[in-house]
Image (spheres, rainbow, N blue to C red):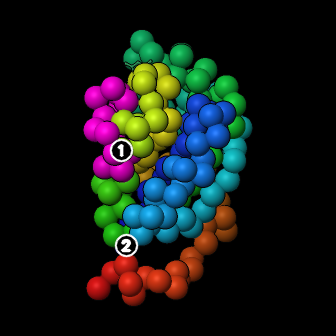
């Protein structure tokens, strides 16, 4: 069982897509173990996206992410990190397959709806950056025996 950090970006919140997007993760059989609406400040945005600090789009990325609240989550499940990246789709929503979140809801890389960790190391780093340990709920979900053999 793996945990991933997932975050609906300001465009998803502003466009009232939170419920629809959350339903996709629940429908898949994944388990939400932490969830909060958070107004990200410039420092946190720059730390979270530190790997892109030298990219030309970095200032606009920071501006976008800090423009309005985001919905930060920890989502758990078997192979959660790669499973969620598949559900999210390619970075550019025009290239993302239809049926993925970005493919179905987005039109522009600079407004691509959602973030998801891309590897175990980044998941660990991002979860620790956004959540205290006591904000992550360790609970057994009642239908897990129907979701997993
Ligand atoms: P995240 O889950 O948000 O990390 O997206 P990703 O892993 O699919 O892509 P990546 O880490 O390469 O880029 C991080 C974010 O920067 C993207 O999700 C976009 O919001 C933004 N971004 C990446 N490339 C571009 C670009 O060429 N132009 C613009 N405007 N934004 C970009
Ligand atoms: Mg990324």
Determine which residue is flagged by label 2. Answer: 1
Where in the figure is residue 85, as x and y percent of width and height? Answer: 34, 48
The magenta region covers: 85-99
Q: Nearer the viewer, residue 22 or 74?
A: 22
Between the residue at mark 1 and the residue at mark 2, the CA separation in whole angstroms equals 22 Å
Structural crowding at the residue carrying mark 1, measured as other residues with C-alpha within 10 Å and reported as few (<14), some (14–19) or many (≥20): some
Q: Does residue 39 show up?
A: yes
Seen in the picture, residue 14 relative to 61 is either above or below; the reply is: below
User: Which residue does the image show at 36% across and 36% down from the upper left?
Assistant: 103
Label 1 sits on a secondary structure element that is loop
Locate residue 147, reporting x and y percent.
37, 78
Please name the predominant secondary structure of the magenta segment in the image.
loop
- Number of other residues with Cα within 10 Å of mark 2, as a class: few under 14, some 14 to 19, many 20 or more: few
The magenta stretch spans residue 75: no
Q: Determine the image quadrant of residue 149.
A: bottom left
**Residue ID for mark 1:** 100
Determine which quarter of the picture holds residue 124: bottom left
Residue 133 picture location, percent across and down: 62, 65
- Looking at the rendered image, the quarter that the N terminus falls into is bottom left
Side (left or right) of 2 relative to 41: left
- Disc 2 is placed on an element classified as loop
């Amino acid at each position: 069982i793996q945990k991933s950090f997932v975050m609906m970006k300001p465009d998803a919140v502003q466009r009232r897509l939170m419920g629809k997007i959350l339903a996709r993760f629940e429908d898949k059989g994944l388990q939400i173990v932490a969830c909060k609406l958070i107004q990200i400040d410039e420092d946190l945005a720059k730390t979270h996206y530190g790997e892109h600090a030298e990219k030309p789009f970095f200032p606009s990325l920071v501006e976008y992410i800090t423009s309005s609240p985001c919905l930060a989550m920890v989502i758990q499940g078997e192979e959660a990190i790669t499973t969620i990246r598949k559900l999210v789709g390619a970075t550019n929503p025009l290239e993302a397959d239809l049926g993925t979140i970005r493919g179905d809801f987005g039109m522009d890389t600079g407004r691509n709806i959602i973030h998801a960790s891309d590897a175990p190391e980044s998941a660990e780093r991002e979860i620790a950056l956004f959540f205290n340990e006591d904000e992550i709920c360790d609970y057994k979900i009642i239908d897990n025996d129907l979701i997993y053999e």
